[in-house]
Image (cartoon, rainbow, N blue to C red):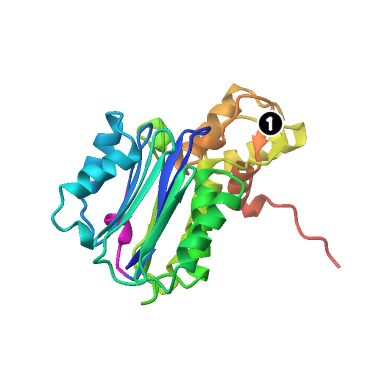
Amino acid sequence: MTFSIVGADLEKGDWGVAVASKFPAVGAVVPWARAGVGAVATQSWANTTYGPEGLALMGSGIPAQDALDRLTDADEHKQERQVGFVDVLGRAATFTGTGCSDWAGGMRGTNFAAQGNILSGAAVVDQMAAAFTSTDGDLCDRLLAALVAGDQAGGDRRGRQSAALLVVREGGGYEGGNDRYIDLRVDDHPDAIVEMVRLFAVWDETILVRNDPLLDATAALVTDIQRRLSALGRFHGEPSGILDQPTRAALADFAGTYNLEGRLRDDEMLSQLLVREICDLTPELNPPAPSG
């Protein structure tokens, strides 16, 4: 009922899972990951204990294949299970029981394992693997590319309903409080993967700060920002065009309210996205349109 890929980026310290299914809220069942340990996708007649138990085994130093074997060997219903593991060193393993509905199967490669069941055909897994290995970028980009490729190759032959993308990184969560660098879910949507791509783009631009064009803090720009922050009740004083401590404090106050803390800087540059947000909230201060 599902196709998924588990992957690792050892250079960045990322582990993750991307998954889609004709099943509601697949992200509540299939993906499991822990920074510095690995990732697990458990599906078909999913045994959700494979998630925490698999991570515990890999966390104790047991390689992915051995950890997977231990769990399936002890499971009397293993022939209805499908699972993918990737460990701290990028070693991958995949298992498809003989009782999984056709088409069902998987493959593994360097730093990934892809698998699926009730698929339109083997091309789904093949294309996922090809996209993962050929796509540039971070692990999240490669996992998402694999999910899109699997969908375009036919995906779940029953249709589309939900998708999820989970990537963990040590201290990668909100304000560094956990490892959930990316934890996105589309629980019920007629074109779930397209919606996941859109949702990821929002998260990427707003939270990840991977691409943040910068603006020189010129006197003219800082004066304009001071005027706008004053109109928003964040800055008190006369606009000076100087990026001084009161101005930085006003920027921090604004950013904290709009979850843009990651856009704050301590040099003489300003985040373009942060400036745009301030301008969008103060359209009355925009220059008048040319007449005529």
Instruction: Determine crowd level at label 1: few under 14, some 14-19, many 20+ residues with C-alpha closer than 10 A.
Output: some
Left or right of 268 on screen, residue 82: left
**Which residue of the protein is positioned furthest toward the bottom in this rendering?**
158
Q: Nearer the viewer, residue 70 or 143?
A: 70
Where is residue 83? Give x, y as percent: 31, 53
Q: Nearer the viewer, residue 263 or 249?
A: 263
**Which residue of the protein is positioned furthest toward the right in this rendering?**
292
User: Pointer 1: what residue?
Assistant: 269
- In the rendered structure, does residue 247 fall within the stretch colored magenta? no
Where is residue 54? Give x, y as percent: 26, 41
Where is residue 159? Give x, y as percent: 39, 76
| Residue at 58%, 48% in the rendered image | 277
| Residue at 31%, 61% in the rendered image | 26
| Residue at 56%, 48% in the rendered image | 205
Q: What kind of element bears circle 1?
A: strand
| Magenta residue span | 23-31
| In the rendered image, the vertical position of residue 44 relative to residue 70, given as above or below | below
Residue 147 seen by the camera: yes
Left or right of 93 on screen, residue 111: right
User: Which amino acid type corresponds to the residue marked 1 in the rendered image?
Assistant: Met
| Residue at 29%, 32% in the rendered image | 62
- In the rendered structure, does residue 28 fall within the stretch colored magenta? yes
Quarter occupied by the C terminus: bottom right
Where is residue 106? Give x, y as percent: 40, 58
Residue 234 seen by the camera: no
Left or right of 18 on screen, residue 80: left
| In the rendered image, the vertical position of residue 69 relative to residue 13, given as above or below | below
Quarter of the view holding residue 273: top right
